[in-house]
Amino acid sequence: MARYLMLALNGPTSGEGDEASCNRWYEDVHMPDFRKIDAIKSARRYQVVRGNLPGMEAWPYVTAYEIETDDLAAVSKRLATEIGPLHPTMDRERSAHLWALQISGDD
């Protein structure tokens, strides 16, 4: 079965709302919604402490989702239809994500 890593790079809008409230929503609502999808094998959230992104400001948070599936299109469709709306203070303009296919490492 193919293994993927999805990195969600995001954070709350600067100066808008309560960052603690956004973080609680992420932990209590958003990540559990992801975990309901059987292909999501793990979900871990990190606070960025430093980075090197030439010409860009780093995102304050990164969430790593490990995914195992032979039908990535079906998982993507479920994410698009089953994950609830974002928190009102989530910075949608700066939010980004990356999908990567595992090509080596432990089995």
Image (cartoon, helix red, strand yellow):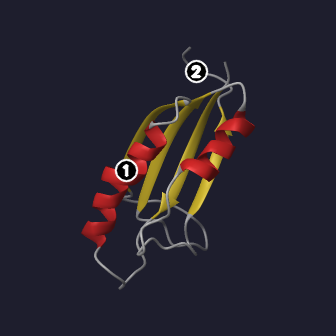
**Label 1: few (<14), some (14–19) or many (≥20) C-alpha neighbours in 10 Å:** few
**Label 2: few (<14), some (14–19) or many (≥20) C-alpha neighbours in 10 Å:** few
Q: Quadrant of residue 92?
A: bottom right
Residue 36 pos. (x, y %): 46, 37
Q: Residue at x 58, y 75 (%)?
A: 93
Q: Quadrant of residue 6?
A: top right
How many marks the image carries: the answer is 2
Q: Residue at x 41, y 64 (%)?
A: 60
Q: Quadrant of the N terminus?
A: top right
Above-or-below relation of 38 to 1: below
Which of pointers 2 and 1 indicates the residue nearer the eye? 1
Q: Residue at x 56, y 30 (%)?
A: 39
Q: Residue at x 41, y 47 (%)?
A: 31
Q: Marks 2 and 1, how far apart in space?
A: 22 Å
- Tell me the element at label 2: loop
Residue 83 pos. (x, y %): 52, 52
Disc number placed over residue 46 in the picture, else none = 1
Q: Residue furthest top?
A: 107
Is 13 or 33 nearer to us in this picture? 33
**Type of residue at label 2?**
Gly
- Tell me the element at label 1: strand
**Type of residue at label 1?**
Tyr
Q: Quadrant of the C terminus?
A: top right
- Along the polypeptide, which appears first: circle 2 or circle 1? 1
Above-or-below relation of 47 to 34: below
Disc number placed over residue 105 in the picture, else none = 2
Disc number placed over residue 30 in the picture, else none = none
Q: Residue furthest bottom?
A: 15
Residues at badges 2 and 1 in contact (C-beta under 8 Å)?
no
